[in-house]
Amino acid sequence: MSLIRITNLGKTYRKRKVEIPALKEASFVVQSGSFVSITGKSGSGKSTLLNLIGGLDTPTSGSILFDGKALHRFSKSEMANHRRFSVGMIFQSFNLIQSRTALENVELALTFGGVPRRKRKEKAESLLENVGLKDRMTHLPDELSGGEAQRVAVARAMANNPKVLLADEPTGNLDSETSSEIISLLQDLNHNHGITIIMVTHDVETAGRVSDMVLKLKDGMIVEQTEKKH
Ligand SMILES: Nc1ncnc2c1ncn2[C@@H]1O[C@H](COP(=O)(O)OP(=O)(O)OP(=O)(O)O)[C@@H](O)[C@H]1O
Ligand SMILES: [Mg+2]
C-alpha cells in the first residue's frame, strides 16, 4: 500500500533574485512500512526533498499525497499537525534542547502532542527504554555520547506515534560502530513496529543493504531508483 505519492515535485529557492532549483520533477512512491534511502552528493537536494515531506518547507511545483491527503495544499495549521503527528524527524546534529535532560526532551514532544501531564513521564520513560537508554534519562545532552544523543532524538521523534520517521544523515556525526547501532535501531523500528523510514545518507553501501528502495539525486533530479524485490 502506498503511503506517500510524490509527483513532479519541485522546489526553487529564490535568493536576491537568483533562482536555485534545488529539486526538479521528482516522482516516486513510498510504500507503507518500507525503508527508503536517499543518496547523492552534497547540494543535490536531499534535505530539500526530506523537508518537503516533513512539512518544514513547501514545494514550488508538483504534489505530495501523504496518506491520501494533499500535503502541498495544507493550511498552516494542517502543516503544524502534520509535523507534530504524522512524521518524526531526526538530524545529523541531534537537535536536542541542551538545557533539558533526555527525559525532558522527550516529555516536551509529548506536551506538544497533547499528552496529559500525568501520563508524560511514564510514556517518555518507556520511549527511552525502547531505544536502550533506561540508565541515561537524567543526563543532559552534553552528558551523552553521540550515539546516545541520537537515541534520545529517535525516542523524541517517535513520541507522538508518527507514520514516518524522516532521518537526515542520522549517522553523519557518528563513528562506524555507533553508526551501525543507530541503523540497527532504525531497522528494528521498521521491522518490528511497522514504521516507514526515509533516510538521507552518504553511505551508499549501507543504503543498499538496509533499504527496500534507494533514490539517487543529482543536481536536484532523481537519476537512479533501485528497488529491492521481495
Ligand atoms: N533555504 C535555502 N535558500 C536558498 N538555497 C537553498 C536553501 N536550502 C538549500 N538551498 C540550496 O539548494 C540546493 C540543495 O540543498 P540541500 O540542502 O537540499 O542539499 P543536500 O543534498 O541535502 O546537501 P548535503 O549533503 O550537503 O546536506 C543547494 O544548492 C543549496 O545551496
Ligand atoms: Mg542535507
Image (cartoon, rainbow, N blue to C red):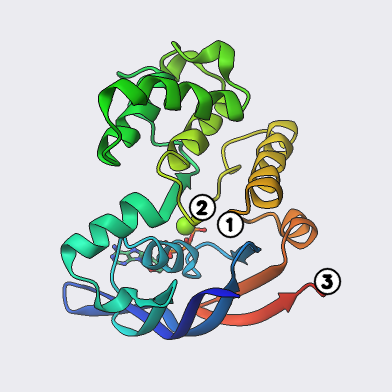
Marked residue nearer the N-terminal end (3 or 2)? 2
Q: Amino acid at mark 2?
A: Leu
Q: Quadrant of the N terminus?
A: bottom right
Query: Looking at the image, is mark 3 or mark 1 earlier in the sequence?
Result: 1
Q: Secondary structure at mark 3?
A: loop
Disc 3 residue type? His
Q: Which residue, given by chain and number where applicable, does mark 1 sit on?
A: 197
Q: Which residue is mark 2?
A: 165
Q: Is residue 82 left or right of residue 30?
A: left
Q: In the image, is residue 134 above or below residue 174?
A: above
Q: Is residue 113 left or right of residue 31?
A: left
Estimate the spatial distance between the alpha carbons at disc 1 and disc 2, rounded to whole Å: 5 Å
Residue denoted by label 3 = 230
Task: Give coordinates of residue 73: x percent, y percent.
Answer: 25, 78
Image vertical order of residue 146 relative to residue 212, above or below: above
At 35% from the left edge and 25% from the top edge, which residue is drawn?
119
Q: Residues within 10 Å of mark 1 (few under 14, many from 20)?
A: many
Q: Are marks 1 and 2 in contact (CB under 8 Å)?
A: yes
* Label 2 residue SS: strand
Q: Position of residue 35 (x, y in %)?
A: 65, 60
Question: Would you say the beta carbon of the disc 1 residue lies within 8 angstroms of ligand 2?
Answer: no
